[in-house]
Image: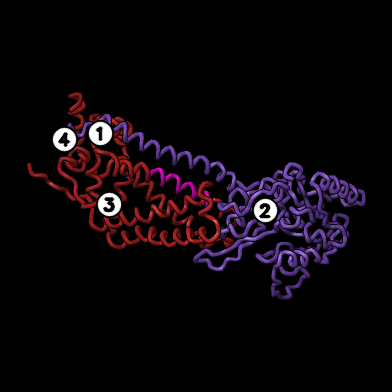
Amino acid sequence: MEIRWIPKYTALERTLHWVHTICFLPLALTGYILFAPWLQALAQGEAGELVRIVHRVTAIFFGLVPIIYTILQPRRMVMNLKEFLTWGKDDWEWLKAALPYYAAGKHEAMPPQPRFNSGERLNAVVMVLGTLLFGITGLSMWFLKGIMPAGLYQIMVFIHDLTFLVTFIMFIVHFYLAVVHPLMWQSLISMRFGYVSKSYAREHHAKWYYGEERAKQMWEEQKAKGGH
Amino acid sequence: MATDVKSAALLLDLAKCTACRGCQAACKQWNDLPAEETVNWGSYQNPADLSYNTYTLIHFDEHEHEDGTLAWLFLNQRCLHCTEAACVDVCPTGALSYNEMGFVSYEEAKCNGCGYCSQFCPFGIPRLNQVSTVTGEAKSSKCTFCQDRTTNGLSPACAQACPTGAIVFGEREEMVAVGKQRVEELKSRGRSEARLYGETELGGLHQMYVLDAKASVYGLPESPKYPAGATLRNVLKPLGNVAIGAALVGSVAAFFITRRNIKMEEVE
């Protein structure tokens, strides 16, 4: 049977996703050096100054990613952002069913999903929010040291640290599901080539493939039958 | 040697200070710090503020006591060497650390210029020589307790130079006793606001003041607190490292569990 491919991402989105990734990793590692006592030697003296330069230069490109996206494809940006922020009762059920699915391949309890499933949207929301917080706190720490009140500066440092922690753990989960997990190879393919197969879209993003109402209807029928 | 090291402290008796600024000069000389070019800004206080090259500074403040008498107050401003020092806790390089004598030691070669110490110090003491805001190139500095002298059995340069006995160096317990006695003396002479500053503050300071007026009159916090931002970071750091470790271990474990449970041959 011929495989039908359905477009999911634009070329710009895929490019920016990978620019974001290759910025996020060195940023996380150079930042973590200031956070981990066992890496202290790398933070000292000239090594520490080099670490800071790498962090700051990379941060500029990291910050440019959402700006370039907004300028070049504002409609796609708004559309995606709206989808990221759309949450419902199904998402809670999806998250509950996610563990048995990802660990044991039990797909029956997974409610139908739009173009981004709950996990993808959670990751996106955390990253969008995280990028905003990194930007605000990072620029303050960079340019306003000694200018803003010390108490406020301390809060900036703390939020920067906290944002790192949350986004980095999110990244580990994202990396595991997108790259390592044996069932998810199509999501990686889609971020490389921009397409997912018809069968994958049907199974994982039914609301996107069939439309919201049809997908819900099918979901109810399937539940009434008790499984596949 | 290490076992019989006693906790050391400096007692800065501000009521005895005549603002000769011998301590400032001695500090510069011993620590090899260059003089700064300054302008007359209407006060004998010179330079106007602490800097990367000025570890100690006499502040000049005019004050009216409760009884209506005028006073010219002198504050010897410098690092107070907290026992619970936020700067040590936030320093990512270990450039700031506790010496076994109790003071906060500083090793400039390790400093990367992040400036956290300057932002988390409850007294706002450490100063950065920011070479560039863009690259962030900088070094921090503060009073080192003359660590090269005090760890070799000498008193700090400022204490050695002080002609009035306003700067006394010794065992901390003894300095507390001397300070308390001085406060009693001052009180018996009608200085009701006299106070020993630093006996218990921030775990006990290793530079204590005998104050001749309210702390706030000198521009000091009445009851200095360990900054909340540093407390939050102290909690977040170990917690964060555990969380990152758990996420990594969890992912690897999840991979093997998944591999065992899912037969790829059976997946459509």
Residue identified by numbered label 1: A111
Residue identified by numbered label 3: A79
| Circle 3: element type | helix
- Chain bearing tag 2 is B
Q: Nearer the viewer, residue A11 or A69?
A: A11
Was residue A169 drawn as part of the magenta stretch in this picture?
A: yes
Residue identified by numbered label 2: B105
Is disc 2 on the same chain as disc 1? no
Q: Nearer the viewer, residue B185 or A177?
A: A177
Work out how far the residue at label 1 is from the one at label 2, CA to CA, in angstroms: 60 Å
| Circle 4: element type | loop
Question: Local crowd at mark 1 within 10 Å, few (<14), some, or many (≥20)?
Answer: many
- Chain bearing tag 3 is A
Q: Quadrant of the N terminus of chain A?
A: top left
Along the polypeptide, which appears first: circle 1 or circle 3?
3
Which residue is painted at 55% across and 52% down in the image?
Answer: B92
Q: Which mark is residue B268?
A: 4
Q: Colour of chain A?
A: red
Q: Nearer the viewer, residue A128 or B81?
A: B81
Amino acid type of the residue that numbered disc 2 sits on in the rendered structure? Ser
Which residue is painted at 45% across and 39% down in the image?
Answer: B243
- Chain bearing tag 4 is B
B241 relative to B130 in the view: left or right: left
Q: Main secondary structure of the magenta part?
A: helix
Amino acid type of the residue that numbered disc 4 sits on in the rendered structure? Glu
Which residue is painted at 28% across and 39% down in the image?
Answer: A181
Which residue lies most toward the right here? B189
Amino acid type of the residue that numbered disc 1 sits on in the rendered structure? Pro
**Which is more foreground, mark 1 or mark 3?**
1
**Which is more foreground, mark 4 or mark 2?**
2
